[in-house]
């Protein structure tokens, strides 16, 4: 056991998976000598060599495109896209090929690969460095979409993603990189992809969140427990796609009320899919409409105004109170 | 201070061995055995005649839209003939003849163009990627494959195909750049057929050649008469040997011409002249290679009939296949079927069963004549 922040925890997962499997390699911009702009791949090139930790030329489409080719050959590339706001330059490779190769070749080839990208606000970064656009990837059949919420689950889910036979888009909340340290087991650990976790039990309302918003939801749950005596059950999704509808529906069937929190824009965001799943699975248990606490439907506004944009605990508490009072 | 020359002037070479008038440069003539020459010609005839057959199949509605290869047989077969089965071939969507040479059964390609992804499934031991339609997106895959070959220390070369239009895409430039930086064993074969649907080469690029685009990436580039199968073979042989020796990638530009339509959904009379097409028909790759073989007395009697019989047998096998089970559409999205897809699969299964079952009995009370709010008044 060691107390690690999320950067060190992710680095541990990468190092252990590379140790375990020679087919695992890393490519991306500045991932080698520099160890990545957030240092997630720190020291890995020194340990595993420049053939396995590749400082690629600066071109997102070719990073993903060549990784697809490597995966078709049987390697297991882990790509780093420096910021998720730059991933539109490789979106066609993700959608047309990484996600579809198994289908396109009816199982003859598949892309066992991970696409890591930092996402989200809260770190005073420039334009195009703060997006939370997981809905694009969650919408693509053939992909899996994972967003951890802390050091331990980040490490375990990244290990699972690397071992997963399907392509996984792995979002890392920049706001969480250095936010907290957690006990992380020394021995390799994996968590199942596609399973949400109930991180705090309650009977009055269900809060559904993930990534950096999981902490915000927990904070709000603690506040309403202390101030209102209401018990919110908090679900940390961990995987966005495939969505663990069963855990969400089971919880809402018990509580009758739900608030979804995400940093992505509201319209057509994950909250819409979650609300629809609740309607389909727990309609007769609902005591109030499902609320969404999300970013506004505007492109990321620049860090000077991000407090008005990214949900915080106060907004979640307000939504919880309104939903309880409905 | 005066400007200094950092690079000596680049030179872009053009290779031609057997021209359209039948002139042969014997010094450059590749040393191919009689059997290889016969196989090459047979593959070209098969490519041409299958193409014609497929156009008829499409017009009859037996397959969907496809991209004919007529006129490009030498470009794709001269190059693909330099590969070993253990090498990798990465096609775009106009390499039918090359794909057959690589072992794709004709009926499988027909299945693909009939709308079934089963037609895109390479055999388990086949080192080939499927038809890829989004232009130029397959180029980085070839570079990644080549990286993996080198990483594993395997003895293989990757050959990737694309057209002149693809050279305007970012993926083309990124792939060449990565291949140059990584020095991986990949051969880029551009079939410059002069037209990207309706856009001629002069509107695609201001470069004099496509071959020269490689030079900016530190990669050798060579332009070759793409209707001269001997020249294409010689150029590809050189590039494949270079890649296999560990000396990195090459770009070959095959100057050829699409004698037919872009796809069967295209009408080229809208954008190009009959005279232009006729001028290129005089440079037909089959005509000059046939004359070359005739001189060598290597032409086989009854070749066309045998090729047609093979095509007819493949078409018969294709038509005997029958439609695959619609439920299999969920089979290959993920390694394991996730719960939401299992649900959608069950839903489709119920619909299919209901469709096959007799119509549901009429409801006991007929719907009222007055429509409810929001109810459709029109019947669809």
Image (spheres, grey):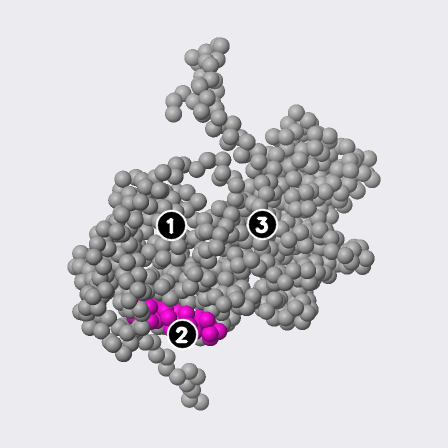
Q: Can you see residue A316? A: no
The CA distance from mark 3 to mark 1 is 28 Å
State the image quarter where residue B376 is shown: top left
Q: Can you see residue B333? A: yes
| Residue carrying label 2 | B220
Q: Secondary structure at mark 3?
A: loop
| Residue carrying label 1 | B105
Q: Nearer the viewer, mark 1 or mark 2?
A: 1
The CA distance from mark 2 to mark 3 is 37 Å
Badge 1 and badge 2 both on one subunit:
yes
| Residue carrying label 3 | A166
- In this view, B188 is above or below A210: below
Q: Are marks 1 and 2 in contact (CB under 8 Å)?
A: no
Q: Residue at x 22, y 73 (%)?
A: B24
Q: Give the chain of mark 1.
A: B
- Crowd around label 3: few <14 · some 14–19 · many ≥20 (10 Å): many
- In this view, B320 is above or below B309: above
Question: Where does the magenta region start and end?
Answer: B231-254
Please name whichever residue, A128 or A160, is drawn nearer the observer in this view of the structure: A160
Image location (x, y in percent) of residue B138: 44, 58
Q: Residue at x 64, y 65 (%)?
A: A36
Q: Secondary structure at mark 1?
A: loop
Q: Give the chain of mark 3.
A: A
Upstream in sequence: badge 1 or badge 2: 1
Please name whichever residue, A103 or A1, is drawn nearer the observer in this view of the structure: A103
């Amino acid at each position: 056991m060691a107390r690690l922040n999320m950067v060190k925890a992710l680095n541990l997962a990468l190092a252990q998976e590379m140790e375990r499997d020679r087919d695992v390699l890393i490519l991306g911009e500045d991932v080698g000598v520099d160890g990545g702009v957030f240092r997630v791949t720190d020291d890995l090139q020194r340990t595993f060599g420049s053939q396995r930790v590749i400082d690629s030329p600066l071109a997102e489409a070719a990073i993903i495109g060549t990784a697809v080719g490597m995966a078709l050959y049987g390697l297991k590339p882990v790509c780093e896209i420096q910021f998720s706001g730059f991933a539109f330059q490789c979106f066609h490779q993700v959608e047309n090929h990484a996600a579809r190769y198994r289908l396109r070749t009816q199982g003859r080839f598949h892309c066992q690969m991970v696409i890591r990208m930092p996402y989200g606000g809260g770190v005073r970064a420039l334009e195009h460095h703060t997006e939370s656009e997981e809905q694009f990837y969650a919408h693509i059949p053939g992909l899996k979409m994972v967003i951890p919420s802390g050091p331990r689950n980040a490490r375990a889910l990244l290990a699972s993603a690397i071992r997963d036979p399907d392509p996984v888009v792995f979002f890392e909340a920049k706001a969480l990189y250095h936010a907290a340290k957690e006990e992380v087991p020394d021995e390799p650990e994996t968590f199942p992809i596609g399973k949400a976790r109930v991180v705090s039990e309650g009977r009055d309302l269900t809060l559904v969140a993930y990534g950096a918003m999981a902490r915000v939801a927990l904070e709000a749950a603690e506040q309403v427990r202390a101030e209102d005596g209401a018990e919110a059950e908090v679900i940390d999704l961990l995987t966005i796609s495939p969505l663990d509808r069963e855990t969400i529906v089971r919880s809402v069937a018990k509580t009758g009320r739900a608030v979804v929190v995400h940093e992505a824009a509201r319209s057509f965001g994950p909250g819409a899919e979650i609300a629809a799943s609740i309607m389909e699975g727990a309609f007769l248990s609902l005591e109030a409409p499902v609320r969404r606490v999300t970013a506004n439907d505007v492109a990321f506004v620049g860090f000077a105004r991000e407090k008005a944009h990214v949900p915080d605990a106060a907004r979640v508490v307000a939504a919880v109170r309104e939903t309880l009072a409905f | 201070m005066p400007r200094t020359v950092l690079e000596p002037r680049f030179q872009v070479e053009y290779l031609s061995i057997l021209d359209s008038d039948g002139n042969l440069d014997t010094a450059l003539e590749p040393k191919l055995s009689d059997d290889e020459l016969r196989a090459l010609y047979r593959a070209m005839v098969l490519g041409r005649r299958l193409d014609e057959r497929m156009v008829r199949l499409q017009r009859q509605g037996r397959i969907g839209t496809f991209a004919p290869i007529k006129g490009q047989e030498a470009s794709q077969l001269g190059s693909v003939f330099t590969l070993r089965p253990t090498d990798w071939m990465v096609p775009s969507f106009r390499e039918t003849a090359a794909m057959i040479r690589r072992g794709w059964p004709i009926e499988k390609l027909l299945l693909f163009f009939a709308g079934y992804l089963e037609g895109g499934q390479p055999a388990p031991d086949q080192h080939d990627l499927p038809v890829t339609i989004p232009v130029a997106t397959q180029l980085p895959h070839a570079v990644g494959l080549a990286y993996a070959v080198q990483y594993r220390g395997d003895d293989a070369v990757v050959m990737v195909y694309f057209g002149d239009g693809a050279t305007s895409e970012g993926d083309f430039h990124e792939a060449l750049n990565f291949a140059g930086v990584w020095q991986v064993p990949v051969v880029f074969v551009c079939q410059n057929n002069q037209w990207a649907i309706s856009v001629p080469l002069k509107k695609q690029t201001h470069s004099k050649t496509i071959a020269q685009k490689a030079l900016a990436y530190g990669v050798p580039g060579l332009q070759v008469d793409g209707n001269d199968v001997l020249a294409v073979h010689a150029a590809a042989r050189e590039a494949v040997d270079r890649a296999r020796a560990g000396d990195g990638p090459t770009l070959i530009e095959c100057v050829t011409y699409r004698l037919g339509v872009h796809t069967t959904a295209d009408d080229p009379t809208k954008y190009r002249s009959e005279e232009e097409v006729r001028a290129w028909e005089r440079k037909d790759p089959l005509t000059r290679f046939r004359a070359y073989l005739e001189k060598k007395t290597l032409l086989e009697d009854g070749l066309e009939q045998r090729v047609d019989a093979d095509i007819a047998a493949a078409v018969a096998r294709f038509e005997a296949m029958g439609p695959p089970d619609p439920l299999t559409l969920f089979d290959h999205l993920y390694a394991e079927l996730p719960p939401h897809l299992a649900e959608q699969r069950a839903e489709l299964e119920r619909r299919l069963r209901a469709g096959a079952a007799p119509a549901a009995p009429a409801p006991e009370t007929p719907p009222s004549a007055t429509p409810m709010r929001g109810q459709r008044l029109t019947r669809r």
